[in-house]
Amino acid sequence: MSKILFKEQLSESVYKMKLEAPLIAEERSAGQFIILQIDEELGERIPLTIADADAVEGSITIIFQVVGATTELLAQLNEGDDIPVLVGPLGTPTHIKNYGKVVCVGGGIGVAPLHPIAQALKAAGNEVVIIMGARNKDLIIMETEMRNIADELIICTDDGSYGRKDLVTAPLKELCERSPKPDYVIAIGPPIMMKFCAETTRPYEVHTEVSLNTIMVDGTGMCGGCRVNVGKEVKFVCVHGPEFDAHLVDFDNMMARLNSYKDIEHEHTCRLHGHAH
């Protein structure tokens, strides 16, 4: 049981919540996530990255986007409400060290899980360049927090309503062409964005990692729902990840698996709203 201590709506469909979770706050490392369940009996279990933690307060911060029935129900909860099931911290922490010059790329809601990683990379002595992208200005989140970390912050929007009118891959390519080129790149966002970030850095041989957000049920590798092909191996995102070498991930296979559940998700959302689909 975890109490909601704070709730804020960041944009039309993105919410920030602070949850009471003293043990998770104490134990978590950058890159790890939690799994929560709203209905103890029938509810879907969803993975969400720990965007921040306060060990003194005993709280963790999650940022999520309403994309289906469970996240919609979560968004309807308010301060003082309880979340019955909260498990974490899960996943392998980000390997943090002083690489030199690092580039952190966040697309849309992917900026939330990128935040603690960028924070940790900066604390380890790296020069940190952050690229943030979204469809429009209203969907840019955590700009102040990221600006406080970054040595250089580049914002891109698809429609040009804020920052550069560009995809995040454009400034990423420019940075790879600079001398010296980045020593390390991490990209978090929609699968298609991560795929193209990987293809952007590949010719420059810049080590690139991505944080994958696949479908998860138990978070222990038992269900196999989160399996991905990395190189010639099958990996489970919940225990082997969520971060992998971007140049080895089979993104096409991963995206096909994610899309295979779209109809079921749509049916559940329709049921939630009480109308036929």
Image (cartoon, rainbow, N blue to C red):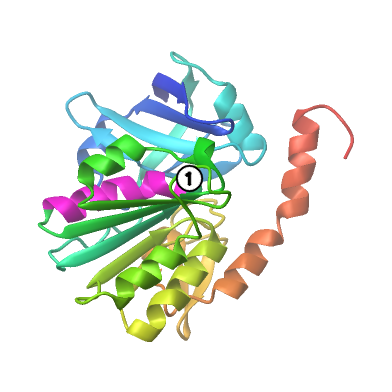
Count of all numbered marks drawn on residues in the image: 1
- Depth check: 24 or 213 in front? 213
> Compared with residue 127, is residue 234 higher up or lower down, i.e. above or below?
below
**Residue at 62% of width from left, 31% of height from top?**
72
**Residue at 53% of width from left, 53% of height from top?**
216
> Crowdedness of circle 1 by 10 Å Cα count: few (<14), some, many (20+)?
many
Residue 272 found in image quarter: top right
- Residue 119 falls inside the magenta stretch: yes
The quadrant in which the C terminus is found is top right
- Depth check: 137 or 189 in front? 137
> Compared with residue 254, is residue 140 higher up or lower down, i.e. above or below?
above
Q: Is residue 224 something one can see in this rendering?
A: no
Q: Is residue 265 left or right of residue 176?
A: right
> Looking at the picture, which amino acid does disc 1 mark?
Ile
> Compared with residue 151, is residue 206 higher up or lower down, i.e. above or below?
below
**Residue at 16% of width from left, 52% of height from top?**
122
Q: Position of residue 200 (x, y in %)?
A: 43, 75
- Depth check: 169 or 23 in front? 169
- Residue 136 falls inside the magenta stretch: no
In the displayed image of the protein, which residue is found farthest to the left?
A: 125
The span shown in magenta is 109-123
The quadrant in which the N terminus is found is top left
Q: Position of residue 160 (x, y in %)?
A: 53, 48
Q: Position of residue 4 (x, y in %)?
A: 42, 21
Q: Position of residue 254 (x, y in %)?
A: 58, 68
* Mark 1, residue position: 109
Q: Is residue 266 something one can see in this rendering?
A: yes
Q: Is residue 26 left or right of residue 43?
A: left
